[in-house]
Image: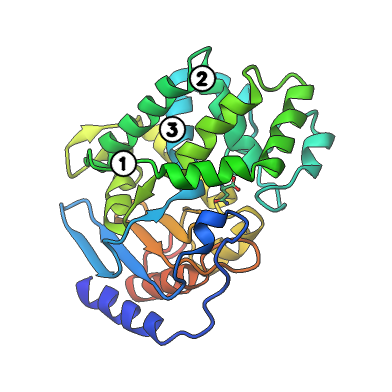
Amino acid sequence: MQQILDDIAAQMALETELGQVADYIPQLAHVDPNQFGISVATPDGQVYAAGDASTLFSIQSISKVFTLTIGLGKLGNTLWSHVGREPSGDPFNSITILEYESGRPRNPFINAGAIAVVDAIMMGHEPREILGEILQFVHFVADDDSIRFDHRVAASEMAHRDRNAALAHFMKSFGHLKHEVNKVLGVYFHQCSIAMSCQQLARAGLFLVSNGVNQHTGIRVINPQRSKRINSLMMMCGHYDGSGEFAYRVGLPGKSGVGGGILTIAPGKGSIAVWSPGLDPVGNSKLGLKALELLVEKTGWSVFSD
Ligand code: GLN
């Protein structure tokens, strides 16, 4: 595995078409696109890494996997009255489908859906309490208490919140949000601002590799059925309108973020985190996708191969 990751990192270093960094969040526009990291955590206790795998980056929408897990833990199946579980086929920040579906977002991984999940898990609590809970959960699954919010990124998103605020107000007009829009957005932007390295993120995904158990700590995080279902959602909706392309090229459940990270789960085999800040036109890491395609080719880890 180490050799495979070293080879992929060497190959990615030769790439010249890096894609665009997400400059609609000014704080992310400063990130150097010439970076690439990859890490794989396997159930037998190993963490392999290559390239810039220990550099911290903004996990952005990858955090939606963690808040979905928290939401299912708190509300169980009631969560599905707040958000659907169908792929949207639309960009991550699209508002159009909300109108046709009475303000109920299609899935928990588009922005509207993730905002609705935050509203659902707030349950009358103050943003500070919920943020503490989210960070504690990330510490627990990654087995690493050093992980922090990047308050500058959160503030940058809050200052440029018009699109997400529009989504939230639109949902609220249908009665889908219970809390004050700015409080919900404050939590949402902070969860997106969590800074992690590929190595930390690979570890954090382990619970989805082994039916809900983090095999490095031996602790059960969720039950097997829930783990399977979160993986299904990642497969179908984890890359927005690029989900079909990701399934076609990689064949694994994955969740991307506009910080350039992708968390990918190979059930029973390993948790893979890749990061390269340059994005393709639908907002997914360009080199990240290429690297995962290579990894799956070399390991045969696609869920569609035997
Ligand atoms: N925080 C980002 C936003 O709300 C998350 C988007 C993403 O990573 N796709 O726009």
Total marks placed: 3
Find residue 29 and report its horizontal and vertical position in percent: 54, 62
What's the distance in space between the residues labelled 2 and 3, CA to CA? Answer: 14 Å
Of residue 80 and residue 194, the one placed in the foreground of this image is 194
User: Residue 147 appears in which quarter of the rendering?
Assistant: top left
The reply to whether residue 222 is visible in this rendering is yes
- The image shows residue 198, relative to residue 51, as above or below, that is above
Q: Residues within 10 Å of mark 2 (few under 14, many from 20)?
A: many
Of residue 269 and residue 89, the one placed in the foreground of this image is 89
User: Residue 7 appears in which quarter of the rendering?
Assistant: bottom left
Farthest residue to the right: give it: 100
Find residue 297 and report its horizontal and vertical position in percent: 40, 75
Numbered disc in front, either 1 or 2: 2
Among numbered discs 2 and 3, the one appearing first in the sequence: 3
Numbered disc in front, either 2 or 3: 2
Q: Which residue is mark 3?
A: 69
Q: Residue at x 33, y 41 (%)?
A: 148
- The image shows residue 261, relative to residue 192, as above or below, that is below
Among numbered discs 1 and 3, the one appearing first in the sequence: 3
Q: Residues within 10 Å of mark 1 (few under 14, many from 20)?
A: many
Looking at the rendered structure, the secondary structure element under dot 3 is helix
Q: Which residue is mark 1?
A: 207
Residue 122: mark in rendering: 2
Position of 54 with respect to 167 (left or right) is: left
What's the distance in space between the residues labelled 1 and 3, CA to CA? Answer: 11 Å
Position of 45 with respect to 294 (left or right) is: left
